Amino acid sequence: MTGVNGGSRAYSSPLRRRMARETRAAVLRAAHDLFVRQGYGATTVEQVAAAAGVSKPTVFTAVGNKPTLLKVVRDVAMAGDDEPVALNDRPTADAVRAEPDQDRAVTLAAAAIIGVSRRYAAVDAVLRGAAASGEEGLRELWEAAEAQRLVGARMWMTTLAAKRTPPAGFDLDAAVDELWLYMAPDQYARLTSRGWDDARIEAWFAGRVRHLLRGSAP
C-alpha cells in the first residue's frame, strides 16, 4: 500500500504543478489583454478572473493583487516568457557578447532590443498611465522600469564598444544616455504608428547605435 500511495503522490504533484502553471498563464494573458485594451484603472481583478475562467481568490493565489498583476505582466512582456531569467542572461544577449565583429553584434543587439519593444510597448503605455495616477507603488514600478532600461543600455553599449577600439572623443556615458532614449518602448510605438515594420525599425536602430559607436557629432 505504501508503494501505491507513494506513486499517487509522485503523479499528482507534477500534475498539480502543471495545472498551477496553466492557471497562472491564463490569468496573466487575461490581465495583459484587459490592461492593454482598457487601461489599468478600468481593469478589476474580478474582470481578470472572469476572462481567465477562474475565481477571484485564484487570481490572488496564482499571481497576486492588481499591482502585482501589472508588474508580472510587465516582466513577462519584456522577457517573452514567465521564466525567472534576466534579459541580460538570455541567449540573445549571449549571442551579442559572443559575436567578435562589432557590426554584426550591433545587428544582433538591434534585433534583440526591438524584439523587447514589440512585446512590451503596449504594456509600457499602460504602466506609464498607471504611474501618472499618483499611486506610490505604481510610480515606483515605472521608475524602476526606467532605471532598468538604463542598466540595459549601459550593458549593451559597453559590450558593443569593447569589440573595436573606440574613436577619439568617444563618450561612453553620453552614448549610454542616447541609447537609453532610443530603447524607450514609446519610440517603437511611434514608428509603428507611422507604418514602419520591424525590419525598418531594426535598421534605423542599428544605424543610430553605429553612429554612437563612431563618436560622431549629432
Image (spheres, grey):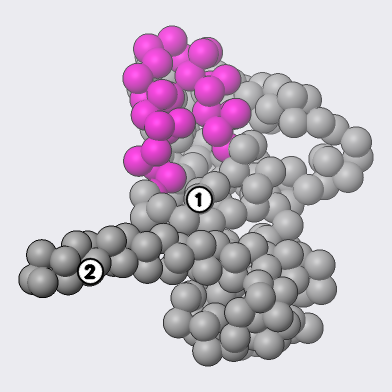
Which numbered dot is residue 81? 1
Residue 161 figure quarter: top left
Q: How far across and down, in percent of the image, does residue 177 sit?
A: 54, 45
Give above or below for 155 relative to 125: above
Was residue 105 drawn as part of the magenta stretch in this picture?
yes
Q: Is residue 178 shown to the viewer in this render?
A: no
Would you say 177 lies left or right of 131 here? left
What predominant SS class does the magenta segment belong to? helix
* Location of mark 2 (residue): 9
Looking at the rendered structure, the kind of residue marked 1 is Asp
Would you say 113 lies left or right of 202 here? left
Give the spatial CA distance, label 2 vs label 1: 29 Å
Residue at point 65%, 81% (across, down): 49
Q: Nearer the viewer, residue 10 or 192?
A: 10
Give above or below for 113 relative to 69: above
Label 2 vs label 1, nearer the camera: 2
Q: Helix, strand or loop at disc 2?
A: helix
Q: Nearer the viewer, residue 25 or 202?
A: 25
Looking at the rendered structure, the kind of residue marked 2 is Arg
Find the magenta span and give its range. Answer: 86-113
Residue 116 figure quarter: top right
Screen quadrant of the C terminus: top right
Residue at point 37%, 68% (across, down): 16
Q: How crowded is the residue under tag 2: few (<14 C-alpha within 10 Å), some, or many (20+)?
A: few
Residue with the most extreme top position: 101
Tell me which numbered mark, 2 or 1, is placed earlier along the sequence. 2
Screen quadrant of the N terminus: bottom left
Q: How far across and down, in percent of the image, does residue 35 sit?
A: 72, 71
Give above or below for 13 relative to 41: above
Give above or below for 7 relative to 174: below
Residue at point 52%, 68% (across, down): 23
Q: Helix, strand or loop at disc 1?
A: loop
